[in-house]
Amino acid sequence: MSWANRLRVYKLILQTSMAERFAYRSDFALGTLFRFLPIITQVFLWGAIFGTMDTTSDKEIAGYKYGEMVAYYLMAMLARAFSSMPGLSSGIARDIREGTLKKYLIQPIDMLGYLFWYRVAHKIVYYVVATVPFVIVFYLCRDYFPGWPDAWTLAGLVVALNMAFLLGFLIESLLGLIAFWFLEVSSLLFIYMMLNYFLSGHMIPLDLLPGWVEWLPFKYLAYFPCKLALGKYDHAQMARELLIEAAWVVALLWLNRWVFARGLRRYGAYGG
Amino acid sequence: MTAIEVRNLSKQYRVYQKQEGMWASVRGLFRREYKTVDAVRDVSFTIETGEMVAFLGPNGAGKTTTLKLLSGLIFPTSGTATALGYVPWERSYEYRRRFALVMGQKNQLWWDLPAQESFRLHQEIYGIEDQQFRRRLDELVSLLEVSQLVGRPVRELSLGERMRMELIASLLHSPDLLLLDEPTIGLDVVSQRKVQEFLKFYQSEHKITVLLTSHYMKDVEALCTRAVVINQGVIKHDGPLAEIVERFSKDKVIQLQIAGECPSNAELERYGIVLENKAPRIKLKVERTRIPATLSALLERCQIEDISVQDRPLEEVIAEFFTDTTTADAPPSELAKDTI
């Protein structure tokens, strides 16, 4: 297939999926708003831990002031909006288990490419619908933030969020492909969800965990963009982290391709 | 020209054998026992371009496995096959553009969107030019009488309507080879007939090669002249549909209309099996070779107003044939349940 042709296909997948997703728009908007409810818990919890509810307090835990800590959780919500892929792994696993995978094998189209653009569409629709609740919540909580980061950091943040999307997609699709070997992956996915919550820094900043967790790719799903937004990296550190993240993206892309090819061979031999 | 050539094709599945009982389950965690199931055994056949061939057989006979092999979804254990000159399991994009697989129980349209959107997606995936796309779509939509429905979300369609949409989706790229797995399964009689009529017309118009599996004899009788009967992965018959009855049914059915008194059941049982004996009608199942003798004896014995000798319905013959063999041979490969 020529590149022009391929682009046309992906553009249409994008359009079609967006139309599909918009069917559920009110569900999205409401869901997004309610997803912020746990932030209230964080405000009180960390207020109690710091022994203060004052956003300008100078007390620090692992280098975070009280206000920064709350801001961290708000940013984590934003990062997760990019890096979380609800239903991707389980969808791939279901396609494999139930055989709907066949449409990617008999039609001249690549499964990962198709799912990727489907997911992009999914996310775009989500952002369009979720912008309003996000703006409202961030505006109400503006006092927790240390202020706007500089232009370079802001640009880095945009890159980091987009790469978080790529990384999230690649990790979850890889997990879904495990279904080629184990038909039932739901408990595995549950374990991953828990680990991810922990290791991505969604639950607590990774500064509070042993240092080695920073060697894993999961930190780019939440921790890295959060900390970046709080202005805790200088430009050199930021560039280094972004490069490492890009390397992870390339490695995982390659791994996905490899596992998919291996999986198909197994599927062809045993499945059906 | 040859469209499909299959030589000594075999496909074995390795199926995990689950043992009963708790201890056995625990042991199963460490050492799994597998059983090999022959889904298709040493199958050979050739299909010419433009032929419409039916695969007949009970569930688990190997029909679907054969179609999966031909569409490249699975690799064979041994043997060779070419379809339109390609080896199916190499899954080249060139081959993918030239065939279509429709499975009656599977849905390939977008559930929440009108079928139209799925068709558009197919247009792009297969790279169909706008003009051609419009022409084909118009043709298919009017043939299948769904012009009112293409704008409705697929989830709101009935099973029969959805099947027709599936057919449209799979024919938009104008495949040279169409593989149909149970295309009328679960449909009501009207929808079934519509699909049959459509397939018949479309095939004769476009001269494409069609291979279909079904266990509805009506489908097969309506559409195909040639049938491949497969059971337990082995081809039992390959030839004209009419031959099946001759080959597999030793009996014919004699129907008599009698004036006056009917002979008793006991008397009639000398000739064959009594299917019906309600004056004035008698229905007898008689061995083919004994038909002439039986007829002359009956003509002598009673006063006959009307008489006919018929082949038994295809459906019955096939059903009987399969129940005979499934009990005699190894258990059927229902373990190799279709998961694709």
Image: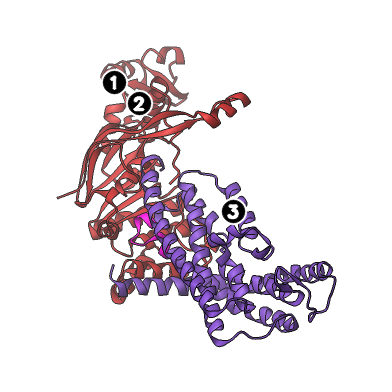
Chain colours: A purple, B red
Q: What residue is at 50 percent from the left and 28 percent from the top?
A: B31
Q: Is residue A112 magenta?
A: yes
> What's the CA distance linking mark 2 and mark 1?
8 Å
* Closer to the camera in the image, A83 or B313: A83
**Residue occupied by mark 3:** A192
Q: Main secondary structure of the magenta part?
A: helix
Amino acid on which the number 3 mark rests in the picture: Tyr
Residue B159: in magenta span? no
- Residue at mark 2 shares a chain with residue at mark 3: no
User: Which residue lies at the image location 28% right of the left edge and 59% below the top edge?
Assistant: B93
- The amino acid at mark 1 is Ile
Q: Which mark is residue B254?
A: 2
Label 1, on which residue?
Answer: B291
Q: Which residues are magenta?
A: A104-113
Horizontal relation, residue A165 to residue A55: left or right: left
Tell me: A271 left or right of B245: right
Of residues B104 and B243, the one nearer the viewer is B104
